[in-house]
Image: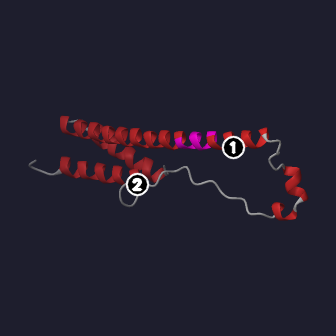
Amino acid sequence: MSGDDEDFILEEFEWALKDPTEEKLRALGDVVSTITKKLVDAIGGLDKRLYDLEVRLDGIDSKVSQIASRGVAPPSAASAAADPAMASAPIAKAPSARPPPTGGGGGLMGELKTLLAARRRKADAPGE
């Protein structure tokens, strides 16, 4: 989270707590609830990705064990250094562990800013 984002959130909470009304406190509760739901969803997504990786790793481990039991050693760093083609082979990069942002532009932080700004406008509107 960038410094601007943190400042924005702190200003919103300070605004609501400076003159705490039931409506402002309820609005902050809604924001905290929304943040909590998003965090729970993100953690659930990470749990699923971790489980999928563990399953894939178990499959790879099983294949390596099968190869080892046949007496064929997996390639080592020394054999890769001896084979110039292996030494210059491109190394694949692991996919990013960050899940794609949800919602349009800005992801969770954009959603939070929009929610906080809407709550402030509603609370500041005269006659409501």
- Whole-percent x, y for residue 56 in the image: 59, 44
Q: Which residue is denoted by mark 1 in the rendering? A: 63
Q: Nearer the viewer, residue 53 or 23?
A: 53
Labels in figure, total: 2
Residue at 28%, 36% (x, y): give it. Answer: 29
Give the quadrant of residue 58.
top right
Q: Secondary structure beneath disc 1?
A: helix
Main secondary structure of the magenta stretch: helix
Q: Are marks 1 and 2 in contact (CB under 8 Å)?
A: no
Residue 123 badge = none
In magenta segment, residue 57: yes
Q: Is residue 29 above or below residue 104?
A: above
Q: Which residue is mark 2?
A: 107
Q: Residue at x 45, y 39 (%)?
A: 43
The answer to which of 25 and 54 lies nearer the viewer is: 54
- Mark 2 lies on a secondary structure that is helix
Q: Amino acid at mark 2?
A: Gly
Residue 114, how many percent across, how many down? Answer: 31, 54
Depth check: give the residue in front, 35 or 94: 94
State the extent of the magenta-drawn residues as a range: 52-58
The disc labelled 1 sits on which kind of residue? Lys
Observer-nearest of 66 and 112: 66
